[in-house]
Image (cartoon, rainbow, N blue to C red):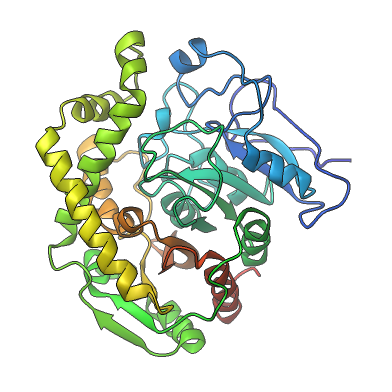
């Protein structure tokens, strides 16, 4: 008998919840999960966070393979969760269906665009939840809501049956309140590769300096615990161009793909958008092709640099977000400032296709902040195993 769900945080999309029972036996047997409303479930219209999208799309003909894999592993689907419109935002705000409450800090945003999935796990409504991460949309809600979260290596998890935003950046990630559950889901979804040990630990100086002093200070103890697992950290400057330039290149490359993926629908439908979303699509449409080409060229060099650095098993460590979640009354200018400062860091893994795990390592002003570990593409399983060991050292839920 499945447990009843009382969604007082507004994590699930409005209307009847979509529920599917998992296989009677399997590695995830007994676990409940939710999925971000950009993954298809057969017979259900994928809303993608926007009423005009839902209005102009037919019910899905098939269920996304990633959902089928979880069901076949024994997990039970308990519903679809809210997302920022077309996944193009980082706070978690949705003016059409309601912004989910952040259970770990109710006066602050939950983070986006996988806001509903993060809220559902943080509120204890499900054991884990599927989201997507293009520019930080699993890592940042995980940090804001005090959860474990993973952005897998690009291409590691099947995205067939998922709405696109930036296809060469898009990944299917997930949240869990326990490190062991995060790992168990990975054992179902991730390919076998890169199982050898990890190390040494590399402290990314730019990301630590980018964090506000309160965040950096709060995470020092957690850094020491990671060093007990992987050895003393080595400090390096990873991006001599500066994180602001890293963000600008990421923004331009992602915007070009966002318009290529969704621009035809936006032009034909002329949908109503909430604050910031329409402006981001307008900016994407207006992206200078030469700037986008320069961004793609930068990405190739940056990716080669990081993959060479991490090829032997090294692990990057840095604050997942420079600040805790913005307060709900933060104005648009303040939100944009946080977005840009944050995405300079989340773009590191995004540009290079790295796997990244965030751990709920500390609190600032009473709100959670995460600590990220990132490794070379294909090292996902090994990174999840390290995260579980670190969680035990930190006395986090294992």
Q: Is residue 241 above or below residue 288?
A: below
Q: Residue at left 68%, top 24%?
A: 42
Residue 212 visible to an observer of this rendering: no
Q: Give left or right: position of 368 versus 257.
A: right
Q: Residue at left 49%, top 88%?
A: 228
Q: Position of residue 176 (x, y in %)?
A: 61, 56
In this view, the residue in front, 211 or 204, is: 204
Q: Is residue 273 above or below residue 124?
A: above
Q: Quadrant of residue 119?
A: top right
Q: Position of residue 75 (x, y in %)?
A: 76, 47
In this view, the residue in front, 99 or 150, is: 150
Q: Is residue 212 above or below residue 115?
A: below
In this view, the residue in front, 20 or 291, is: 291
Residue 86 visible to an observer of this rendering: yes
How many numbered marks appear? 0
Q: Quadrant of the C terminus?
A: bottom right
Q: Position of residue 25 (x, y in %)?
A: 87, 51
Q: Residue at left 61%, top 46%?
A: 129
Q: Residue at left 32%, top 32%?
A: 258
């Amino acid at each position: 008998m499945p447990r009843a769900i009382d969604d007082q945080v507004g994590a699930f999309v409005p209307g009847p919840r979509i529920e599917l029972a998992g296989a009677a036996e399997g590695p995830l047997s007994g676990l409940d999960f939710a999925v971000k409303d950009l993954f298809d479930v057969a017979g259900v219209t994928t809303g993608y966070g926007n009423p005009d999208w839902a209005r102009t799309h037919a019910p899905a003909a098939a269920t996304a393979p990633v959902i089928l894999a979880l069901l076949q592993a024994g997990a039970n689907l308990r519903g679809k969760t809210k997302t920022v419109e077309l996944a193009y935002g980082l706070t978690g705000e949705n003016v059409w269906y309601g912004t989910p409450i952040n259970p770990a800090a109710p006066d602050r945003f939950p983070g986006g665009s996988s806001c509903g999935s993060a809220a559902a796990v943080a509120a204890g409504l499900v054991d884990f939840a599927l989201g997507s991460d293009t520019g930080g949309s699993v890592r940042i809600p995980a940090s804001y809501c005090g959860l474990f979260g993973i952005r897998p290596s690009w291409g590691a998890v099947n995205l067939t049956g998922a709405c696109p935003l930036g296809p060469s950046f898009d990944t299917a990630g997930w949240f869990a309140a326990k490190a062991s559950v995060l790992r168990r889901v990975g054992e179902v979804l991730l390919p076998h590769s890169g199982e050898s040990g990890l190390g040494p630990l590399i402290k990314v100086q730019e990301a630590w300096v980018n964090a506000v002093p309160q965040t950096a200070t709060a995470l020092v103890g957690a850094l020491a615990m990671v060093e007990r697992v992987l050895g003393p950290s080595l400090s390096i400057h990873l991006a001599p161009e500066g994180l602001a330039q890293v963000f600008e290149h990421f923004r331009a490359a992602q915007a070009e793909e966002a318009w290529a993926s969704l621009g035809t629908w936006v032009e034909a439908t002329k949908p109503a958008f909430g604050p910031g979303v329409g402006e981001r699509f307008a900016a994407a449409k207006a992206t200078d092709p030469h700037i986008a080409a320069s961004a793609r060229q930068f990405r190739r060099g940056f990716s080669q640099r990081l993959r060479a650095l991490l090829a032997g098993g090294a692990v990057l460590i840095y604050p997942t977000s420079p600040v805790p979640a913005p307060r709900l009354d933060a104005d648009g200018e303040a939100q944009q400032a946080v977005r840009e400062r944050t995405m300079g860091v989340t773009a590191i893994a995004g540009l290079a296709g790295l796997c990244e795990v965030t751990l709920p390592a500390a609190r600032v002003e009473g709100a959670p902040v995460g600590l990220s570990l990132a490794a070379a593409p294909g090292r996902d399983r090994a990174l999840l195993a390290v995260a579980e060991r670190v969680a035990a050292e930190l006395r986090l839920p294992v």
